[in-house]
Image (cartoon, rainbow, N blue to C red):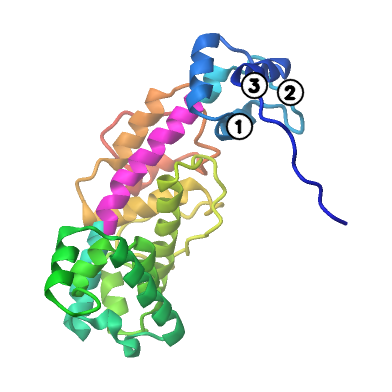
Amino acid sequence: MARPRYNQPQISVLEQIRLLKSEGLEFSDKNRSIHILEHISLFRMKSYLRPFRISGSRLFKTGASFDDAYSLYKFDSELRKLICSELEKIEVSIRTQFSLIMGDESGTYWFEESANFRDQKRHAGLLANLEAELRRSDDDAIVDFQRRYSNTFPPSWITFEVSSFGTLSMMYRCLNAGHARRKLAKIYGLTDTVMESWLHSIVYIRNICAHHSRLWNRKLSINALIPRRTNLPFINIPSDTKRVYYIMSILLYFLQTVNPQNTFASRFKSLLAKYPNVNVLSAMGFPMHWQDEILWHSSQPSVT
């Protein structure tokens, strides 16, 4: 049976507000709400309105307001920015260590040698990705290298500073099992299989944040591996490892090596305190006694 074509017309912002009001949503400041919906689409806001609806109904719970949904939207936006600031540090560290270790093990152009990889077809695809990324780059070092030399690629310490983190993660995944894979993982106190999985999860979270997508209550489609052991403090494994708490704990774990004096936990607690009326911890997968975890200790006041 052929599927019907979608042909519903777009409705104006005023009509959007009238519709939401008819479904029971309260608006304390109509002009402010108009301004918000003129700059943040209702489609984007729907994810933040959903928790305020009666389950299985189009109607909103008694007392639900547009201001409540917008506070949730702002919390999620600030959460993504907080995570991005730490992802940058972790990503730069891994790029640096990967190039240092592989350069020592297999030379400057280790990534071009198919013998270093267990899947030659995938390796060829990764090189094609790298070439495309270099063509798009206007970095001074890349432009200068291509002007002066005939090599397809600059040395690894230049190439992997401008490659996508996704390509770097796949390079690690496809690398032959052996000393180099284990050595990189060991720097962060992990086994190479856990390192591979956690890199993949970091790329996934990075992409969510880069596209400004909803994060706080997301059920993650990639499940980061549960380590049998770690060389540094980690957490008691929660019942649901597809929630944001688990991936945030993974970031905190990396930061013990990358930036031991980090303030990630205390800044997250400050973010919670900034939005006291936004109840998010359960949906993010935080267990009841999460602040008792060594990994999440900080000097900030507790948040209940």
Q: What label sits on residue 46 in the rendered view?
A: 1
Residue 302 seen from this side = no
Determine if the magenta segment contains residue 83: yes
Residue located at (43% from left, 42% from top): 290
Label 3: which residue?
A: 16
Residue located at (37% from left, 85% from top): 117
Determine if the magenta segment contains residue 158: no
Q: Nearer the viewer, mark 2 or mark 1?
A: 1
- The answer to which of marks 1 and 3 sits earlier in the sequence is 3
Is disc 1 surrounded by few (<14), some (14 to 19) or many (20+) residues within 10 Å? Answer: few
Element under disc 1:
helix
Label 2: which residue?
A: 59
Name the residue furthest right: 1
Quick one: quadrant of the C terminus?
top left
Residue 48 seen from this side = yes
Q: Nearer the viewer, mark 2 or mark 3?
A: 3
Q: Amino acid at mark 1?
A: Lys
- The answer to which of marks 2 and 1 sits earlier in the sequence is 1
Magenta segment boundaries in residue numbering: 71-91
Q: Nearer the viewer, residue 70 or 145?
A: 145
Q: Position of residue 187 (x, y in %)?
A: 24, 68
The residues bearing labels 2 and 3 have C-alpha atoms spaced at a distance of: 14 Å
Element under disc 2:
loop
Q: Nearer the viewer, mark 1 or mark 3?
A: 3
Is mark 2 in CB contact (under 8 Å) with mark 1? Answer: no
Residue located at (42% from left, 34% from top): 77
Is disc 3 surrounded by few (<14), some (14 to 19) or many (20+) residues within 10 Å? Answer: some
Q: Amino acid at mark 3?
A: Gln
Q: Nearer the viewer, residue 201 or 1?
A: 1
- Vertical position of residue 79 compared to residue 168: above or below: above
Q: Position of residue 233 (x, y in %)?
A: 32, 56
